[in-house]
Amino acid sequence: MSSRNIWTHKGTFLLAAVGSAVGLGNLWRFPYLTGENGGGAFILVYAMTIAIVGIPILIAETLIGRASRRSPIMGMKHLTESQGLNNAWRSIGWMGAAAAFIILSFYSVIAGWAVHYTGLMFSGSLAGADAEAIGASFDNLLASPVLLLIYHTLFIVGSGLIVGMGIHKGIEGSLRFLMPSLFLILLIVLVYSLMVGDAAAAFSFLFTFNLQDLSLEGWLEAMGQSFFTLSLGMGAIMAYGAYMSGEASLTRTAFAIALVDTVVALMAGVAIFALVFGSGLEAAQGPGLMFVTLPIAFAQLPGGSILGGVFFVLVIGAALTSAISLVEPVAAWLVERFGFSRPKAVALMVALCWLLGLVTVFSFNLWSEGTITHQLFDRSPFDVLEFITNILMPLGGLLIALFAGWALSRDAVIREMGTNTGWFSIWQFLVRFIAPTAVAFVFLRTIPQIEGNLRPAVLAVLMIVAFSVGRRLLARRRIG
Ligand code: PHE
Ligand code: NA
């Protein structure tokens, strides 16, 4: 492995990982989930999960990436082989690639909406419009496969161009310009919304912690969101970690990523709810919070068209820096495995995700109110994203935690973590016990058909299965 495949500076991994983490998850998903789940209590559980599950898995993923210095698929192959471990661990790489495909295909369509709204805002065509007109314009967008396709194409081609230019010129170069700009835009939007909106209402909604307010569903959604927002469980961080300088500290970097990501989510939450409450609107709007409720607020405010336009530029930029981290793991694998040139590998990945995105593009149209599909399947296209965030990402994260916590040799771990044994033992305890338990809790919820009084039995069976499977997974072959 040549030094061409290491980030230019000790701190570049942090920049890249923050770019990956900060995205639609912070600006779009976090506020609407918080709005649906009643505010502060949701945020409390979300923040707790980030601290005790998210950060340890973030460290584990970076560690695996840096220890293998390969794409997630090849990296898992390399580590299992060199450590004489069960081949089943390689599923971590494959599942991650599958998740990257699905997330990017969906992500690109939603980011495409932001492209559309940037135009709507700057052109002033929503200025002064009433709630009904703005709601109708969103429905029209969803009902138009042509429009959705155009924006989806623009966005995904843009991400492909960046990654195609390589990790230095493309990824590092764009991040070095985009990340500070995005932060500045976010600050401007925040200050503006605090001035014109209802800051007090926003603060009391977001920071009144009443755990009784939170449904069981809300607890579990908070956990899923903590994986999504930190880009965990699917290899994006692993792929970036493969290029991380050997000198950078894993723990300090992970803390910084989680901190910045959380602060950005909170800043977005404060800005959005100040505007929403200031205009007398409701918090619980679901995925339409950013695309209907917020534009309604912008339409009523002085300078709202411009600030709205600036806000959606922020959304596009943040989504772009996340999308490139979804392209990288698979593209890097294509380069390593088949010797493709980088542009060719990226083109292939992007083309496939573009195609898969057609499913999302048409599903919004087919799913719209009153259609037969809507009546036949009581499912929304958002359920796909829920499945990924609440099942696939936590499952990936669980396996990653177990792999780093139990399977990897102590030597390999210490080599990456250093000898700062204080953090080391806390981290090891969290990835070995706490993170897996918390994720198991998420999974039991995805089986709502199980009657409450059957749950202990199901749990017992699962633990026995996990134990015997675990013994096999941890058995080491002799290497040689
Ligand atoms: N973390 C990103 C966000 O918050 C989403 C993402 C998930 C990006 C997985 C890359 C990998 O929007
Ligand atoms: Na995020």
Image: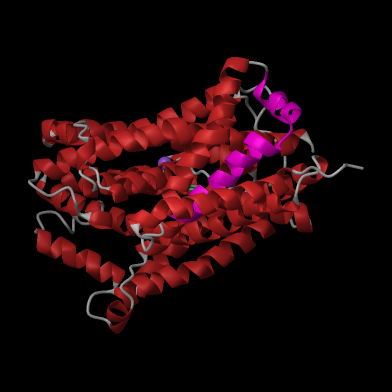
Res 111 visible: no
What residue sits 72% from the left and 38% below the top?
69
Q: Toward the viewer: 105 or 210?
A: 210
What residue sits 31% from the left and 81% below the top?
376
Quadrant of the image occupied by residue 192? top left
Q: Position of residue 330 (x, y in %)?
A: 64, 54
Quadrant of the image occupied by residue 343? bottom right
Q: Position of residue 130 (x, y in %)?
A: 9, 59
Ligand 2's quadrant: top left
Reply yes or no: does residue 409 show up in magenta.
Answer: yes
Q: Farthest residue in the right direction?
A: 480
What residue sits 47% from the left and 67% below the top?
357
Q: Main secondary structure of the magenta part?
A: helix
Q: Tell me the magenta residue range.
A: 390-418
Q: As displayed, is residue 379 above or below residue 247?
A: below
What residue sits 39% from the left and 53% below the top?
445
